[in-house]
């Protein structure tokens, strides 16, 4: 069967998702406490970043001089706000299971509030570049989670959260990039942002996995670097080599996020997501 | 730079990794010297004219909109709509219902709704009239699946018709259930003749109850029609053989049953009137165009001011005070 082109010109709208966490086990990836915590780092890392995106893009809104981009940024803000809220709920569940994520989340909040907080006009645009770089990574991860069949055995509500979030990341993958280029199309600026963002986020992710596996009394051992290779081989975390290759595309001159990822896959998932179709 | 957070593992000292990161952040900040440019304004308006006006069913008019010089229009996909600026200044969205391969005209079909100001203005347009539109934009993305069931209620056929044609062309195993009040009120019946189409006017078959009955196993359902029909589909989906339901993302519903009240912006000392049919957000935006909001349905929280979600909340009494 032939197919149509990937859907384009999407109207972005936040979805009123609800998740029922009542029976979420601590280790929602069956038999894989370390793998669970490697993915749990996302719940610790993302909300502070997403709230930072919401604030920054709200500041950008009155200055955007393109009505279509304005509407997309409006939708982007709502989607990011919903993502932050959903991950926060998981943190509550973790606390109820006796794992306190606060030492780590305090640090992440400090990074976004203080290190990346207010600054000059030049830094405003630089922060747009940082968000565009982070959004490139989240859309790569979103595309991965939509296709990661090895996760099918995970707890269904958590899997729905990850795939709903991933699908919306794929759906809105061009917004931050287009906003950045609306203000500044310097190749140097966007390349520089990724040189900062990719290593720092990778390091924060590893650090988070070490933190959570130590903080969870029910986790048999701490995460180790070889766990990444083991879990990637099993398909429950992204393959670092493939991830690296996807990230490298960012550095191609003339790159645009519409060249990567499948809106169709996102649309397909969102039509089946229990949280998004109550 | 404020104090570095405490050590991650609870040791009594500032976190060394965060201190390192602060140094990296400082160095990075010093690289960002060049401000961005002032964005160049982009005008997305298409100035079109009514090229054709046809009555296609009882109370339904189809309009073909084209550029005055006949130049090709921006491409679109099944599911896309146009944002039409009406002579009165109102804006309405209409699904594109023509053939995407026709690059020189956009076709929309509009049902006259009793008391509907937008549809009345659309029906009043004559051939040659100027219409300013924006778009096409896609709030109903169409993704081809091996098995598909289309469900259209009345004028909801407009976005569905191009999807059906695309599905037929691409070899999809598809079905269409098309409901309406009467045959005469249902547009495009002549072009939708196929054994795969079930036409179900209420005056012959009664109000439909089993819209998903013909769904093949694993079918993706694309539905457009009145809200009660979509609610029924949503409720019936889990027990059916279909596995996915695609509906259009609608703009927020109008305010119904609201009462007028006074709105006080405490910090700026401004007092405004919120009429019965408008939201606090609508009124605030007139004086504060940069106020934050997104979903306009009271769930995303981006418009929250204090305890008030200004997109949906109203005054409990006759006065609401916002810290703005």
Image (tube, helix red, strand yellow):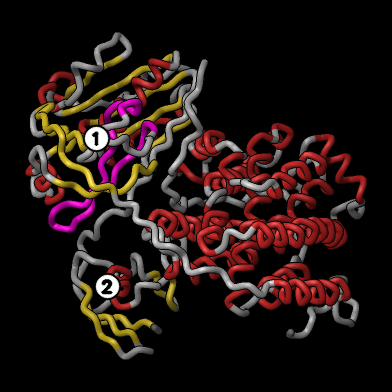
Mark 1 crowd level (few <14, some 14–19, many ≥20, 10 Å Cα) = few
Q: Quadrant of the C terminus of chain B?
A: bottom left
- Where's residue B153, x and y in %? 25, 31
Residue that numbered label 1 is attached to: B70
Q: Quadrant of the N terminus of chain B?
A: bottom right
In front here: A239 or A94?
Answer: A239
- Where's residue A257, x and y in %? 59, 46
User: On the rendered structure, is A233 left or right of B42?
Assistant: right
N-terminal of the pair, mark 1 or mark 2, is 1
Q: Name which quarter of the figure residue B149 lies in.
A: top left
- Where's residue A91, x and y in %? 67, 61
**Residue located at (25% from left, 17% from top):** B192
Residue range corresponding to the magenta coloring: B77-102
User: On the rendered structure, is B290 left or right of B13?
Assistant: left
Q: Can see residue A93?
A: no
Question: Is residue B79 shown in magenta?
Answer: yes
Separation of disc 1 and disc 2 at Cα? 41 Å
In front here: A140 or B282?
Answer: A140
* Mark number displayed over residue B283: 2
- Whether discs 1 and 2 lie on one chain: the answer is yes
Question: Is residue B289 shown in magenta?
Answer: no
Q: Can see residue B67?
A: yes
């Amino acid at each position: 069967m032939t197919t149509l082109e990937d859907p384009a010109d999407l109207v972005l709208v936040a979805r009123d998702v609800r998740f029922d966490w009542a029976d979420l086990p601590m280790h929602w990836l069956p038999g894989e406490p370390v793998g669970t915590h490697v993915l749990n780092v996302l719940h610790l890392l993302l909300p502070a970043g997403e709230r930072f995106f919401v604030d920054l893009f709200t500041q950008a809104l009155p200055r955007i001089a393109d009505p279509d981009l304005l509407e997309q940024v409006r939708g982007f803000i709502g989607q990011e706000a919903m993502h932050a809220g959903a991950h926060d709920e998981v943190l509550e569940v973790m606390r109820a299971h006796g794992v306190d994520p606060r030492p780590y989340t305090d640090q992440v909040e400090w990074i976004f509030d203080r290190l990346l907080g207010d600054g000059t006009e030049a830094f405003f645009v630089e922060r747009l570049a940082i968000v565009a770089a982070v959004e490139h990574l989240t859309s790569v991860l979103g595309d991965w989670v939509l296709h990661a069949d090895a996760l099918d055995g995970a707890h269904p509500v958590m899997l729905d959260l990850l795939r709903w979030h991933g699908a919306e990341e794929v759906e809105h993958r061009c917004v931050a990039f287009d906003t950045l280029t609306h203000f500044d199309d310097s190749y140097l600026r966007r390349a520089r942002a990724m040189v900062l963002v990719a290593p720092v986020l990778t390091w924060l992710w590893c650090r988070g996995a070490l933190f959570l596996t130590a903080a969870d009394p029910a986790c048999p051992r701490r995460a180790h670097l070889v766990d990444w290779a083991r879990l990637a081989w099993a398909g429950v975390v992204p393959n670092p080599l493939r991830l690296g290759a996807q990230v490298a595309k960012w550095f191609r001159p003339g790159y645009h996020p519409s060249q990567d990822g499948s809106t169709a896959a996102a649309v397909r998932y969102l039509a089946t997501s229990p949280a998004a179709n109550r | 730079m404020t104090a570095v957070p405490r050590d991650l593992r609870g040791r009594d000292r500032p976190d060394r990794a965060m201190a390192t990161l602060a140094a990296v952040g400082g160095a990075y900040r010093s690289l960002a010297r060049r401000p961005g440019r002032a964005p160049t304004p982009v005008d997305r308006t298409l100035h079109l004219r009514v090229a054709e006006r046809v009555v296609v069913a009882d109370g339904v008019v189809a309009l073909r909109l084209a550029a005055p010089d006949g130049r090709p229009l921006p491409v679109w996909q099944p599911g896309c709509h146009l944002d039409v600026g009406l002579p009165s200044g109102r804006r309405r969205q209409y699904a594109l219902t023509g053939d995407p391969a026709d690059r020189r005209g956009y076709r929309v079909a509009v049902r006259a709704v009793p008391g509907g100001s937008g549809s009345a203005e659309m029906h009043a347009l004559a051939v040659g009239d100027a219409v300013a539109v924006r778009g096409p934009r896609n709030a109903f993305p169409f993704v081809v699946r091996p098995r598909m069931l289309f469900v259209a209620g009345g004028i909801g056929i407009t976005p569905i018709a191009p999807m059906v044609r695309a599905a037929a062309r691409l070899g999809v195993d598809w079905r269409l259930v098309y409901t309406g009040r009467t045959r005469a009120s249902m547009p495009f019946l002549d072009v939708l003749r196929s054994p795969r189409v079930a036409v179900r006017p209420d005056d012959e078959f009664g109000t439909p109850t089993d819209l998903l009955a013909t769904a093949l196993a694993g079918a993706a359902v694309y539905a457009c029609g009145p809200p009660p029909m979509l609610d029924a589909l949503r409720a019936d989906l889990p027990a059916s053989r279909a596995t996915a339901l695609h509906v259009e993302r609608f703009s927020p519903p109008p305010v119904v049953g609201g009462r007028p009240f006074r709105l006080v912006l405490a910090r700026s000392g401004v007092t405004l009137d919120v009429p019965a049919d408008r939201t606090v957000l609508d009124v605030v935006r007139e004086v504060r165009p940069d106020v934050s909001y997104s979903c306009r349905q009271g769930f995303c929280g981006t418009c929250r001011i204090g305890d008030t979600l200004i997109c949906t909340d109203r005054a409990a009494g006759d006065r609401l005070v916002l810290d703005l």
